[in-house]
Amino acid sequence: MREALESLRTEALAATEAADQLEVLRDLKVKYLGKKGELTSVLRGMGKLSAEERPVIGSLANEIRSQLEEALKTKETHLEELQLDEKIREEKLDVSLPGIVNPIGAAHPLAAVIEEIEDIFVGMGFEVVEGPEVETDQFNFEMLNIPKDHPARDMQDTFYITDDILLRTHTSAAQIRTMLEKGGNTAVRIISPGKVYRRDDDDATHSHQFTQIEGLVVDKGVSMSELNGVLLTFIEKIFGAGTEMRLRPSYFPFTEPSVEVDIYHPEKEWVEILGAGMVHPNVLAKAGYNPERYTGFAFGIGIERIAMLKYNIDDIRHFYQNDLRFLKQFRSV
Ligand code: FA5
């Protein structure tokens, strides 16, 4: 029996030594020390031993059990340490590796130009208001002195939704909304940016959907020279001091006199960027302002044209094609 125990010791210690996985150790523990394990089954034969032999074999068995337990524990700790080292090695961060760069978005060039223009006018005491893109014929035309049969309707070929509802052809509709809101006896000093729509054929300088900024000043004693001063200040701020501006007589049914404003560009020479004029007395009256006491001026700026001149863009369609090669050039704008 002694020999059986000794060979069990040798075999179990060798197996423990050889184990290279925690699972293997667990199996060995069951195999040798478990209730149905080999040590227990050797000890089951103790009944056949003499009274003198029994304590000797008993103490040998206990010695082997604790030696084996000790060996298994030591090996277990060792394997756990190895496993932890491996994990640390795998999860180690190499701070010298190049990082993953997330692409950063930027404002669309038109949005950036609108913001810049808003800042310039806010600096001159203007308030920013918004109007709806789906407008009534009444606000887009009738109240701007353009009745249904008026030839000026041909100047702005319109997308109609019904006979009386349309996609606004210009931001001038915001003039009427603002004056009605102010009630006929309060001064007005607003700009109103937004999208407008016309059934124009798209080409390098025309788009069926484009952006305007309307301006409107109504007060007692407002004059054409103030309009001139406001526009020149705006143009010098957006294109740089010394930029030349020219007013050409023109015609809009809602202003009298009316002008078209060009700026001088070294390559393109004179380029039209906006329409303007003194608010027509009929328009003031329709919107509740007494033209005997109040005068006003208004202007409508084409934003794409401004952005094209400012950034040397040769085709208006670039703004609407969402080509990243184009848009990425405006990251720092
Ligand atoms: C108007 O729309 C008037 N409402 C402007 C105005 C307001 C005059 C207040 C007087 C008082 P016009 O149709 O000219 O005017 O357009 C104004 C500007 O919008 C033009 O100078 C041009 O810069 C721009 N524009 C006009 N049509 C297009 C188009 N199809 N695509 C891009 N820009 C355009």
Image (cartoon, helix red, strand yellow):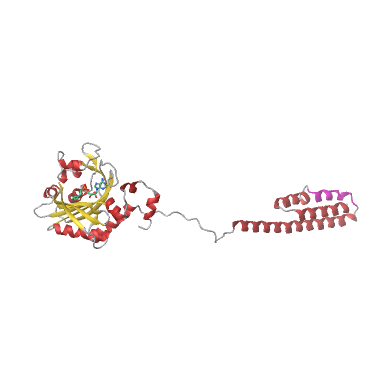
- Which sits in the foreground, 44 or 290? 290
Q: Quadrant of residue 234?
A: bottom left
Image quadrant holding the C terminus, namely bottom left
Q: Is residue 300 visible?
A: no
Q: Is residue 45 left or right of residue 206?
A: right
Number of numbered discs visible in the structure rendering: 0
Q: Is residue 43 magenta?
A: yes
Q: Main secondary structure of the magenta part?
A: helix
User: What segment is highlighted magenta in the picture?
Assistant: 37-49
Question: Residue 28: where, in percent of width, then height?
Answer: 75, 51
Q: Quadrant of residue 142?
A: top left
- Which sits in the foreground, 286 or 311? 311
Q: Given the current orientation, which residue lies at the most extreme top position?
A: 163
Q: Residue at x 67, y 59 (%)?
A: 81
- Image position of 1 with respect to 162: above or below: below
Q: Is residue 73 magenta?
A: no
- Which sits in the foreground, 76 or 151? 151
- Which sits in the foreground, 251 or 81? 251
Q: Is residue 52 left or right of residue 304?
A: right
Question: Residue 62: where, in percent of width, then height?
Answer: 81, 56
